[in-house]
């Protein structure tokens, strides 16, 4: 996806789990406060309209949207991506810290990413 498409608000929406930065604990970001999503997420999603594709980035988004299907943690949830495709794709949070995760889970780049790339192109047509 090129930059113009990524920043086209009529085609791509990035909706965080919280509209605040909750701070740090032991060098890591604190999780988004649950009350934030309860307070505004449904309304924000209603304004965004219908989505052809939803990418759930990180465990917090996965737990919120997938509920019990995300109970086994990020790796298990992402590994079960076929259970949610083609409408929803759970992904690990992008971070330099995930380099080791990517090495331990080569199926992510070999299997999931090619399908996701194709789905992104289909959704943008």
Image (cartoon, rainbow, N blue to C red):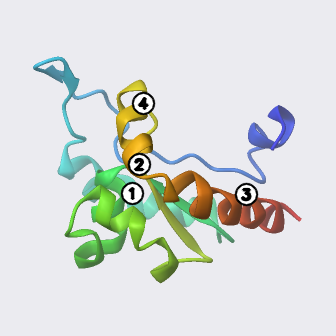
C-alpha span from label 4 to label 1: 24 Å
C-alpha span from label 1 to label 3: 26 Å
Q: Earlier in the sequence, mark 1 or mark 3?
A: 1
Q: Are marks 4 and 1 in contact (CB under 8 Å)?
A: no
Tell whether 112 sits left or right of 34: right
Question: How would you rate the neighbour count of disc 4 (Cα within 10 Å): few for under 14, some for 14-19, many for 20 or more?
Answer: few
Q: Earlier in the sequence, mark 3 or mark 4?
A: 4
Q: Residue at x 51, y 62 (%)?
A: 45
Q: Residue 27 at x, y = what percent?
A: 18, 17
C-alpha span from label 3 to label 4: 19 Å
In terms of depth relative to the viewer, which is nearer, 35 or 51?
A: 51
C-alpha span from label 3 to label 2: 16 Å
As helix, strand or loop, the secondary structure at mark 2 comes to loop
Tell whether 92 sits left or right of 113: left
Q: Which mark is residue 57?
A: none
Q: Residue 50 at x, y = what percent?
A: 65, 71
As helix, strand or loop, the secondary structure at mark 3 comes to helix
Check disc 3 and report the residue beneath it. Answer: 117
Query: Mark 1 against mark 2, which lies toward the viewer?
Result: 2
User: Height in image: 9 above or below 115?
Assistant: above
Q: Are marks 1 and 3 in contact (CB under 8 Å)?
A: no
C-alpha span from label 1 to label 2: 21 Å
Check disc 2 and report the residue beneath it. Answer: 92
Q: Is residue 64 visible?
A: no
Q: Residue 39 at x, y = what percent?
A: 28, 54
Q: Which mark is residue 95?
A: 4
Tell whether 76 sits left or right of 27: right
As helix, strand or loop, the secondary structure at mark 1 comes to helix
Q: Residue at x 69, y 71 (%)?
A: 52
Query: Mark 1 against mark 3, which lies toward the viewer?
Result: 3
Q: Earlier in the sequence, mark 1 or mark 2?
A: 1
């Amino acid at each position: 996806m090129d930059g113009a498409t990524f920043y086209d608000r009529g085609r791509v929406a990035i909706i965080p789990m919280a509209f605040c930065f909750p701070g740090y604990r032991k060098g890591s970001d604190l999780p988004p406060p649950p009350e934030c999503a309860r307070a505004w997420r449904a309304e924000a999603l209603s304004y965004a309209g219908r989505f052809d594709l939803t990418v759930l980035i990180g465990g917090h988004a996965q737990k919120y949207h997938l509920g019990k299907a995300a109970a086994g943690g990020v790796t298990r949830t992402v590994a079960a991506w076929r259970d949610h495709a083609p409408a929803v794709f759970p992904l690990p949070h992008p971070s330099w810290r995930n380099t080791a995760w990517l090495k331990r889970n080569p199926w992510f780049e070999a299997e999931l990413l090619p399908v996701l790339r194709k789905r992104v192109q289909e959704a943008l047509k």
